[in-house]
Image (cartoon, rainbow, N blue to C red):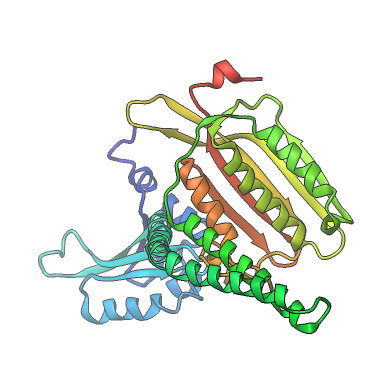
Amino acid sequence: MIKPEDPIEILDAMEQGILALNAQGKIEVFNASLERTCGLSRESTLGKSLADVFPAEEWLHPLYQRFLRHGNSVTLHDQSLSNRVPVSLTISPLWGQKDAVRGTVVGAVLVFQDLSLIKKVQEHFLKSDRLSYIGLVASGLAHEIKNPLTAIRGAAQLLAKEIPQGTESIQCCRVIVEETDRMNRLLEELLTLGRPHRIEVRPVNINQILDELILLESKSPTAKGIEFIKEFDPSLPYVPGDEEKLRQVFLNLIRNAVEAIKETGTVWVRSKFATEYVTIDPGEKKKTHILVEIEDNGSGIPEEEQEKIFIPFYTTKPKGTGLGLPLCLQIIKEHKGTIKAHSTPEKGTLFQIALATSEWEGEFKR
């Protein structure tokens, strides 16, 4: 139990990052939460100035100078530290106990609030809103676009019957039919992305799905020179889900991994228990999760593009539609799971999909 006479332990127990400066502007307090947020040790900061400890935080120093000029509390929202952790910061005067009546400031207290979790929640809802908006647009335009496409396709087929075979014109008719079919497929993908789907929940053998997909892709001409490494936990329970939709997600990610490798490389496909993922639904028992990882050592995703990969229509592929990963995101969300991407340019990409196990665990466990 923390005792009142243990101020350092009290500060270390706080969720906010706390930094205290003395009258000379030197750091005297740097609590454990701030160590985690900044990635700095207390020992490396004590006795130093803000400029020494935070040389890259250009927004911090004008705020501190403003505080020194006016002596009033100042707050700055939505900033980033040099390690890219988003924070808000409040600087308040530290009053001397004996001189508080006369208003003597003997230092300053800086309170850092880590906004990482808040940012993740905001991003989650922004993605959800974006998908819902696209669904509304797609539903309104689908029939208006599909009907003319059907007419164009039919007219091209009729023209093809009137044109001599082997001519350039007959080839143009074939191109028209192929392109209208491609547009129809794109519209179907767009409708699939925007509208909610009914999930046919059944016990799914994740390892079996992954094994079949790897066998399928390893025979593909595009996978020549690529080694597939399987690392499956044989003790995994069945997962409640729609097998066809989960198959679609894993196939998309495995193919993306193959396409990211230029000539030769490796694709790792793993399944295991995810000890860091535990959820408790209202009125239900605690659920464990399994984690599926699909990793490649290909070209990776440029840093400036990593936040955009789940945005509909955003793609770096010459013939891509930009709907593959958004569809994967929607399917995994419908399964109440999560999907995350980690990528290093020129080193590779890792996708992680977490799915909850179910009440069937004891009945269906292999």
List the single residue furthest toward the top: 363
57 to 44, vertically: above or below = below
Q: Position of residue 271 (x, y in %)?
A: 67, 37
Work out whether residue 42 can be spotted.
Answer: no
- Looking at the picture, tell me which residue is in the foreground, 88 or 21: 88
Say left or right for 183 vs 207.
left
14 to 322, vertically: above or below = above
Q: Residue at x 56, y 52 (%)?
A: 328
List the single residue furthest toward the front: 162
Say left or right for 332 vs 114.
right
Q: Position of residue 132 (x, y in %)?
A: 38, 59
Quadrant including the C terminus: top right
Quadrant including the N terminus: top left
Work out whether residue 318 can be spotted.
Answer: yes
- Looking at the picture, tell me which residue is in the foreground, 98 or 5: 5
31 to 167, vertically: above or below = above
Q: Residue at x 40, y 62 (%)?
A: 139
Say left or right for 55 vs 246.
left
Residue 206 position by quadrant: top right
Residue 107 position by quadrant: bottom left
- Looking at the picture, tell me which residue is in the foreground, 38 or 343: 343
